[in-house]
DNA sequence: TATAATTAGGACCAATTAGGTCCTCTTTTA
DNA sequence: TAAAAGAGGACCTAATTGGTCCTAATTATA
């Protein structure tokens, strides 16, 4: 269940597309470009606009554009725009009013985990998502990339047909 | 929806309790100690046992104990024991067989995010959860802790009653 | 000025899924 | 041999998600 909501997923796809285009684009346009359901695209764009991640223009020839450079938008921001604050446990949502509060001492350090995740996602910018092969994260990935080939003993190869 | 399943939450509480006790403990015992529903505790313990995070002993006087030191158990492992592999997007679950695969180029870098989260959670050990104020993460938290007091101009203070 | 294109803001419903509960079988100790 | 305890699932319902639709507000253009 540690999964993003579909809408959030859509959100990242749309944001990525937006980051790659220089003109303002309508919701329907973006939906078509991403092959996402138009209604869902509209919904998610409204969320993103409300959070100030995209700038909206109403009326004919209206549409959406990034509110700032893709490098200045983090994945955390996108997620929180759509799902609300990142909180892996109920506790951090309800102001510590969970139903097993007594043993919350037992789990007192959960907020550290929330923070860790938020920070990790903060490290990833929309630019990282949009431009494969560029950006801080992609560079890191290259550096620690698994080998593209491995050696195996020749006599371990068998004919299967 | 970036939230842990309740069972996972229970899992961490139980693991924490287990980390703090030196004797083997039965599921019912652990449930009582954590005020968790006994059935849920049993279920989660089975998952944890299957994943090899706890060692189980069947029969009378049976029970569970950590399979290795708390410092050698990461939150990632606990989560994956209960929820399966961490994959924030569907994509990484279904071997890239999602329904909008075409635009998956658009989101090609999502696996970087999955990795980031997994790594972040890998940094947090059960020991960190169990012992507030000790462990790598807690130390980090202290170092970057927000100030416990701030200065405000005296003339901004108003009497409200 | 009217109309078409668009976003804003929700309401609403169906299908999925999570969260609980329960049942039976196996293993071990007293 | 009986009681205590884990293993492994099946199963149900209550909540949530994901999708759809509707209406109002706003803007360009004919």
Image (cartoon, coloured by chain):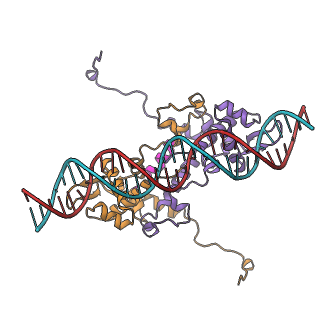
Chain colours: A orange, B purple, C red, D cyan
Q: Residue at x 56, y 29 (%)?
A: A101
What is the residue that sits farthest to the bottom in this orientation? A161
- In the shown orientation, is residue D3 left or right of residue A90? right
Most foreground residue, D17 or C21: C21
Q: Residue at x 43, y 28 (%)?
A: B148
Most foreground residue, B155 or B2: B2
Query: Which stretch appears magenta?
Result: A114-125
Q: Residue at x 39, y 56 (%)?
A: A11
Where is residue A149? Give x, y as percent.
60, 73
Picture layout, residue A19 above or below residue B30: below
Q: How many marks?
A: 0
Q: For the stretch drawn in magenta, what is the main secondary structure?
A: helix
Q: Does residue B101 appear in the picture of this structure? A: yes
Q: Residue at x 46, y 62 (%)?
A: B109
Where is residue B30? Give x, y as percent.
70, 34
Quadrant containing the C terminus of chain A is bottom right
Q: Is residue A124 magenta?
A: yes
- In the shown orientation, is residue A26 left or right of residue D26? right
Where is residue A33? Give x, y as percent.
35, 67
Where is residue A77? Give x, y as percent.
39, 49
């Amino acid at each position: 269940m540690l999964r993003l909501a579909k809408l959030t997923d859509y959100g990242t796809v749309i944001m990525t597309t937006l980051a790659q285009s220089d003109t303002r684009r309508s919701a329907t346009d973006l939906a078509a470009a991403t092959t996402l359901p138009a209604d869902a695209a509209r919904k998610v764009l409204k969320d993103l606009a409300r959070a100030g991640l995209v700038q909206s223009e109403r009326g004919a020839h209206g549409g959406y554009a990034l509110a700032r450079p893709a490098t200045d938008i983090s994945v955390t921001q996108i997620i929180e725009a759509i799902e609300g604050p990142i909180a892996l446990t109920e506790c951090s949502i309800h102001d510590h009013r969970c139903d097993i509060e007594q043993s919350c001492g037992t789990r007192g350090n959960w907020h550290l985990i929330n923070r860790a995740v938020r920070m990790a996602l903060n490290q990833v910018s929309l630019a990282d998502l949009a431009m494969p092969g560029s950006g801080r994260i992609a560079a890191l990935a290259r550096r620690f990339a698994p080998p593209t080939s491995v050696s195996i003993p020749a006599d371990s190869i068998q004919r299967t047909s």
